[in-house]
Image (cartoon, rainbow, N blue to C red):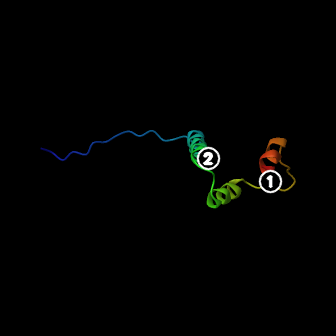
Amino acid sequence: MSDAIAMQFVPPVSPEDQARADLYGLLARLFYAPPDANLLTELRLAAPPAADGESLTAEGEALKAA
């Protein structure tokens, strides 16, 4: 019996697919239980700051206020 290594092709995950999976994971976590302090901190730090001279869109302002 030979000890051949089985090779499997695993296609790379596109950044868009990874972002979608991360968002679905976050939504599932929020449906599962209320966010704890750690998750709220991570969400606050994950939002990129507006660049100098740029303002947030109306949707961005609403999300920031929430």
Number of numbered markers: 2
Instruction: Decide which of tag 1 and tag 2 comes sooner along the chain.
Output: 2
Residue at 80% over, 53% down: 50
Q: Is residue 66 left or right of residue 16?
A: right
What residue is disc 1 on?
50
Amino acid at circle 2? Leu
Position in image of residue 14 (x %, y %): 55, 40
Please state which of the two labelled residues, at mark 1 or mark 2, is closer to the viewer: 2
Q: Quadrant of residue 40?
A: bottom right
Residue that sits furthest to the right in the current view = 53
Farthest residue to the front: give it: 33
| Above or below 41: residue 21 | above
From the image, tell me which residue sits under label 2.
30
Q: Secondary structure at mark 1?
A: loop
**Residue at left 31%, top 42%?**
7
Residue at 86% x, 49% y is: 55
Nearest the camera: 44 or 36? 36
* Within-10-Å neighbours for mark 2: few <14, some 14–19, many 20+: few
- Residue 4 numbered tag: none
Q: Is residue 19 left or right of residue 45?
A: left
Quadrant of image for the N terminus: top left
Among the 4 quarters of the image, the one containing residue 58: top right
Q: Residues within 10 Å of mark 1 (few under 14, many from 20)?
A: few
* Amino acid found under the numbered disc labelled 1: Ala
